[in-house]
Image (tube, grey):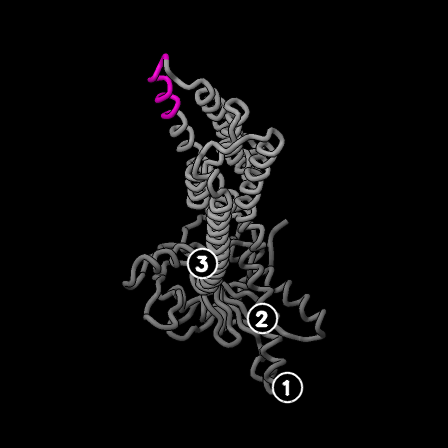
Amino acid sequence: MKNDQYTIWLNAFMWERLRLGLVIAILSVSSFIALNLSRYPNFIPSWLYTNLIQEAALLFCLVLLHFPFGRARPGWVFLLFSCSITLIPQYRSLLEGVAKLDFVTWTLIFLGQATLLPVQWRLHLLSQLGLWLVFFTIQIAYHLPFDSEMVQADPFYFYLYLFWFCIICDISVYLYEKLQYSEFQAKLHLQAEQEKSERLLLNILPESIAKRLKQQHSTIAEDFSQVSVLFADIVGFTELSARISPPELVQLLNNVFSRFDELVEQHDLEKIKTIGDAYMVVAGLPLPRPNHVTKIADLGLEMQTTLAQFNQEHHEHLKLRIGIHTGPVVAGVIGIKKFAYDLWGDTVNTASRMESYGVPDCIQVTDRIYQALKDKYILIERGKINIKGKGEMTTYFLKGKRR
């Protein structure tokens, strides 16, 4: 995966640099064409013809770069670009009858290529070897003399000079490419760690709250006028913990709660926390939703079904008490260490009381929930019960949906 991503980045980098290099080369050749034409009628025909051919080749490369072939294969365009500025001038050798060993221009070209496109050292080496091969082929095949007295005096010196200059350029490109690849891998690693941290943060906080927390360091607190809160508790958990080993207990609890987590995600609700064997979910925040009561009711019913399936698969006899209430809450994040998104208010307390005063394998709800669900759901009145801190309350058992 990393190599694929690096290849995509490398192609994009080469494409951008090639476009820049081609624009510079086109402007450069245009300036020499203008200089040659300014000397009319004493311009040098072979020089003008060579520059016109070179300009046409460079324009072709620039156009090719914007087609799918050029975008997908910038290395091929680079070789064509390099040939255009190094091999085409050899055309003058045939016109003028001399071998054009232009060490000044060549060194500038190789240095410019290594500076503008400091990646893919093999392409640089290939373009240099191509130039030498064409040069010696023309010089030997046509028995052309050198066009410089300095070169004629000691051609080996200039060969050695250009040889080492090419080697230095290739080594520079190789080292830069190696450094660039290492930096790219480090960047990918950092990105992966950031994504991991982001996922961990989103496991603790709702996405909108996580974004706000990263932007501000003050306390985050919001009022929500209508939400529905569900508390669920595994009945007989204390006795269960005495019967099985701690690792088995944790594994069992994790298995059950992981299934509940999947249900919460499917219904697009917000899990608030687990405390021991207690499980707390809310519907209607951090983004308000009009159907929060039915959503939380559906979740409660599916949690019962899921636990029944778990019991059948693992030969257990776990039971749930579930309590639901609806109303206003305050939600937010407090503290600076081990912070968590939490809810406060009478609605939370009442939902908790519905669970703690409930009956195993039943979903106990308040009158508010009853009024919201009675037309589409089956609810059985339990009657009045005395709730700590609330006094007598009429509660109901949610049994299922009406067909």
Asked whether residue 19 appears in the rendered view, the answer is: yes
Which circle, 1 or 3, is nearer the viewer? 1
Please tell me which residue lies in front, 372 or 294: 294
Q: Amino acid at mark 3?
A: Ser
- 2 drawn magenta: no
Q: Are marks 1 and 2 in contact (CB under 8 Å)?
A: no
Q: Is residue 145 left or right of residue 386?
A: right
Query: Which secondary structure, mark 3?
Result: strand
Quick one: label 1 or label 3, which is nearer the N terminus?
3
Residue 217 rendering spot, x and y as whole percentages: 29, 63
- For the point 57% across and 64% down, the residue is 260
Q: Amino acid at mark 1?
A: Arg
Q: Find disc 3 in the rendering and name its residue.
A: 228
Residue ranking furthest to the front: 153
Residue 114 rendering spot, x and y as whole percentages: 45, 45
Q: Find disc 1 in the rendering and name its residue.
A: 243
Q: Find disc 2 in the rendering and name its residue.
A: 320
Magenta residues, as a range? 31-41
Residue at mark 1 to residue at mark 2: CA–CA distance:
18 Å
- 34 drawn magenta: yes
Residue 122 rendering spot, x and y as whole percentages: 56, 47
Report the label total.
Answer: 3
Q: Residues within 10 Å of mark 3 (few under 14, many from 20)?
A: many
Residue 252 rendering spot, x and y as whole percentages: 62, 75
Q: Amino acid at mark 2?
A: Leu
